[in-house]
Amino acid sequence: MAIEVVVPMLGITVEKGKILKWHKSEGDSVTKGEPIFEVETDKVVTEVESPGTGILKKILIRENVEVPILTLVGVITGKDEELPQKYRTVGAETQAPPVSPAPPKTSSPSAQAPAGRASGEGYDIAILGAGPGGYVAAIRAAQMGAAVLLVEKSEVGGTCLNWGCIPTKSFLSDVKVYKRVKESDLFINGSKVSIDLKKMVSRKDKVVETMKRGISLLLESQKVKRVSGAGKFLDPQTIEVTSNGKAETFKAKHVIIATGSRVASLPTVKVDGKKILSSDDVVHLKEIPKEVVIIGGGVIGVEFATLFNGLGSKVTILEMLPQIISTEDEEVIRGLKILLEKQGITLLTQARVLSATPGKDGVEVAIDREGKQEKVRCERVIMAVGRSPYTEGLSLDRIGVQMEGRFIKVNSRMETNVAGVYAIGDVIGKMMLAHAASAEGIVAVENIMGEAKEINYHRIPSCIYTFPEVASVGLKEIEAKQKGYDIQVGRFPYLSSGKALAMGESEGFVKIIAEKRLGQILGVHILGERATDLMGECLLAMNVEASIEDLGEVIKGHPTLSETVMEAALDWRKMAIHLPKK
Ligand code: FAD
Ligand code: NAD
C-alpha cells in the first residue's frame, strides 16, 4: 500500500516549509526513519524522516519550492507496486504555489529625524502611557533612531510598577519568609514571630522608587522626550497634553496608545478603599484584617489569597465559575485548588456575588450558589473581578478608532483601523500582562520603523505568583486534543526532585505536552516553586523549535529545580531517570 510523504507539522505557528534538498531520487529504496528530505521554515532547517520502508516512487514537490505544512510531497510504494492512479495526475506545478514576496518595507523614520529630536513636522512616534507597554516601546523606538515623545499622566512604570506586579511580588517575597519561619519547627519561638507591616510596605516603596529612578535614567539616556499630563487626540497626528489645566499640542507621524487599564468592579459593589478594597488599596495596606473575602478567583484573587493567608488572615475566595483560575490547564487547576485549601484558604466556587454592603462590623456579601441565595460576613472585601481598559478622555471617537467591546481593536501588527495609530497592552485586552504589553510595544515600534512583525501569543507565558507558583505557555492538554494533535504528555513531580525536597518545596509538577511523532512542544504547564523562572528554558526551546527530546538531553546542574523540566521531557518517552518504571 502506498505511503504518503508530507511536510510535517513543525510547530503551532509554522505554516509553510521549503523543500531544501531531497536526499533520495525517484526509484531509490527508503527505510522507515531514515532522513529523506530537508525542509526549511522561518524557524528551523530540519531533516524529515521517511514514514515507511519501500521505494520512493514519486517526488511531487521539487527542491526550493515552499508549500504549506502537511502538503503531500512524495509517495512510497512497495518494491514491485505501481504508483496508484490518484497520484499520477498530481504534478509539482499544481502542488507548489510560488513563494509570495515579502511585503515592501516602508521607509524608516530614523532617516528623517535623529534620536530624541523632533523635526519640524514633530516627533516620529508619540506614546500615550508609560507603563511596561509604553516605556518599553519608547526605549526600543529610540534605540532604532526615532524621535520619541512619551506622555504619562501619573507615574512612570504604570500599573505594573506602582500598583501591580512589583509591589505584590515584594510583599509575597516577605510573606514567604514570614510564613516559613512561623510554620516551621526549626526556629525557636518561630511561631511567635510577627511581621512589621509598616516595614513591609516601606521596603516595597523603596523597590518601586529604585525601579522608577532606573526607568527614568534609561529614558533619559535614550533621549526620549517626556511630558507629564493626560494626552488626547485632536487628529491622528496631533496630541493635546493637559496638565494642571494647561494644554500643549504635539505633532507625531505615528501614535501608540498604551494607556492600560484600571480596576473593574461589579455594578452593585462600591469600592470605598476602607472596607471594600481594590488591588490599588492593598499596595498601601495599613493593617492586617482578621478575615478577608476576595471576590473573584482569577489571577489577582489567588495571589491576594496567598498574600493575606500568609499574613495570617482567614481568607475566602468567592468565584462564580465552577473553578478558580479557569483559563489554566485542568491538572494545574486541580493541583492549585488542593494546595490552597491545604493552606487554609476557603474556596467557594459557583458562588456569584450579588452585592456587598459595608456595615458597622464589617461587610455582608450576598451570593448566589446554584440558585440559592446565601450571605457571607467578613471584616474586609477585596474586589478582583478583572480590569477595564483605560480609554476615557482620549477622544478616540474623534479620530474614528474602532473598538472590540470595551477594548481598542488591533491586528497582529498592533495597528488600529486608523492609519499611523497603534495600540498595545491592557487597553487592547489580549493578554493583560506586563510582558505581553512590552512585547506588543516592540512589535508596534518595529512595524513603524519599517519591519514586518506580528505578535505571537502562543509564545507568551502566563505567570501566577501563588505558593507555589503557576506558569504556563502554549496549548492546554484539552486544546491540543481539540486541535487534532496526536499528543503525548511528559510529567515530573517536584516530590521526586532532590532540590525541591531540600528546599522544603516538594509540591507540584511539570507537565509538557508534545506532538507524538516529532516531539514538537505544544504546551508547558508548571505548578511548583519557581515555576515562573523555570518556564524561561521551555520558552527558549519552543522559540527555537527544539523538540521535547532536545529538552530532555540538556545536562542540568545538580541539584537544581531545572532538572524537573529535563525529567518531564524524558518522561515523554518513559525515560525519566527518577521515576519508577511504568
Ligand atoms: P499600564 O501599566 O496600566 O500603564 C498605562 C499608563 O498609561 C498608566 O501609567 C496611566 O497613568 C497612563 N495613562 C492612562 N491614560 C493616559 C492618558 N490619557 N495620557 C497619558 N497617560 C495615560 N502582570 C504581569 O505580567 N505579572 C504580574 O505579576 C502582574 N501582577 C499584577 C498585580 C496586580 C495587583 C495588578 C493589578 C496587575 C498585575 N499585572 C501583572 C498586570 C500588569 O500590571 C498589566 O498587564 C500591565 O501593567 C499593563 O501594562 P500597560 O503598559 O498596558 O498599562
Ligand atoms: P480575572 O479575569 O483573572 O479574574 C476575575 C475572576 O472574577 C474570574 O474568575 C470571574 O469568573 C470572577 N468573577 C467575575 N464576576 C464575579 C462575581 N459576580 N462573583 C464571583 N466571581 C466573579 O481578573 P483579575 O484576577 O482581577 O486580574 C485582572 C488582570 O490582571 C488579569 O487579566 C491578569 O492577567 C492581570 N494580572 C496578572 C497577574 C500575573 O501575571 N501574575 C497578577 C495579577 C493580575
Image: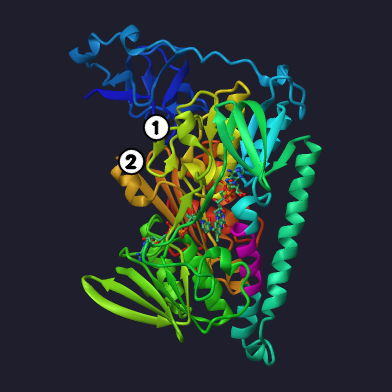
Q: Quadrant of residue 504?
A: bottom right
Residue at (73% x, 31% y) in the render: 143
Most extreme residue toward the left is: 85
Residue 449: give its label.
Answer: none
Given residues 48 and 427, the one toward you in this image is 427
- What kind of element bears circle 1? loop
Q: Say left or right for 290 vs 25.
A: right
User: Which quadrant: the C terminus?
Assistant: bottom left
Q: Are marks 2 and 1 in contact (CB under 8 Å)?
A: yes
Q: Choose the circle earlier in sequence order: 2 or 1.
A: 1
Mark 1: which amino acid? Met
Q: On screen, 195 above or below 453? A: below
Residue at (46% x, 19% y) in the render: 18
Residue at (46% x, 81% y) in the render: 344
* Magenta region includes residue 75: no
Mark 2: which amino acid? Tyr
For disc 2, the marked residue is 485
Q: On screen, 471 above or below 241? A: below
* Prevailing SS of the magenta stretch: helix
Q: On screen, 362 above or below 522? A: below
For disc 1, the marked residue is 9
Percent coordinates x, y for residue 330 in the rendering = 36, 59
Callout 2 environment at 10 Å: few (<14), some (14 to 19), or many (20+)? some
Q: Which residues are magenta?
A: 163-175
- What kind of element bears circle 2? loop
Given residues 483 and 164, the one toward you in this image is 164
